[in-house]
Amino acid sequence: MEVRAIYKMARISPFKSRDVARSIKGMDARDAFNVLAFYPKKAARLIRKTLGSAIANAENNHNLRAQDLYVKGVFVDEGPKFRRYQPKARGSAGIIRKRTAHICVVLDEKENKS
């Protein structure tokens, strides 16, 4: 059974987050949670928070055990951009785009080999 958790409007660029997301796809849920604790990036902290929420959803809402779960997919989609303006030469203005991301973590049960 698929279990998911979504973190919307995360204040990080999706381009920076996708690198971390690719690294944990297919791992056991608990192993991925521990690996992300030592990843030296802000995206790892945000994805770890979402992964912890997905594990809690599986345990509390679907009565699944954390050791039976693996990371089926991690999707980082682009959210809305906050636009700020910075004064430039000759009275013009430059746009500063503060990007946001929607992080979705999907967990699934491992297949029993019996």
Image (spheres, rainbow, N blue to C red):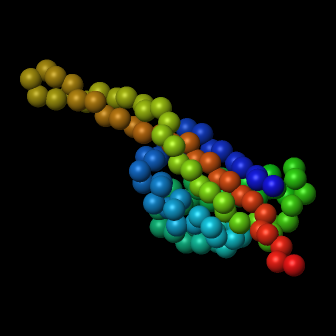
Q: Relative to 40, is 70 on the left or the right?
A: right
State the image coordinates of residue 37 (x, y, percent, origin top left): 59, 68
Q: Nearer the viewer, residue 107 or 44?
A: 107
State the image coordinates of residue 112 (x, y, percent, origin top left): 83, 73
Residue reaching furthest to the bottom: 114
State the image coordinates of residue 53 (x, y, percent, origin top left): 73, 53
Q: Is residue 111 above or below residue 6?
A: below
Q: Relative to 25, is 17 on the left or the right?
A: left
Which of the 4 quarters of the picture holds residue 94?
A: top left
* Residue 37 is at least partly visible in this image: no
Which of the 4 quarters of the picture holds residue 70?
A: bottom right
Q: Quadrant of the C terminus?
A: bottom right
Q: Is residue 42 above or below residue 27?
A: above
State the image coordinates of residue 33 (x, y, percent, origin top left): 66, 67
Residue reaching furthest to the left: 90
**Residue drawn at x 79%, y 69% as measured from the top left:** 111
* Residue 81 is at least partly visible in this image: yes
Which of the 4 quarters of the picture holds residue 93?
A: top left
Residue reaching furthest to the top: 91
**Residue drawn at x 47%, y 55% as measured from the top left:** 18
Tell how many labels: 0
**Residue drawn at x 81%, y 55% as measured from the top left:** 1
Q: Is residue 22 above or below residue 57?
A: below
Q: Nearer the viewer, residue 102 or 85?
A: 102
Q: Relative to 93, is 68 on the left or the right?
A: right
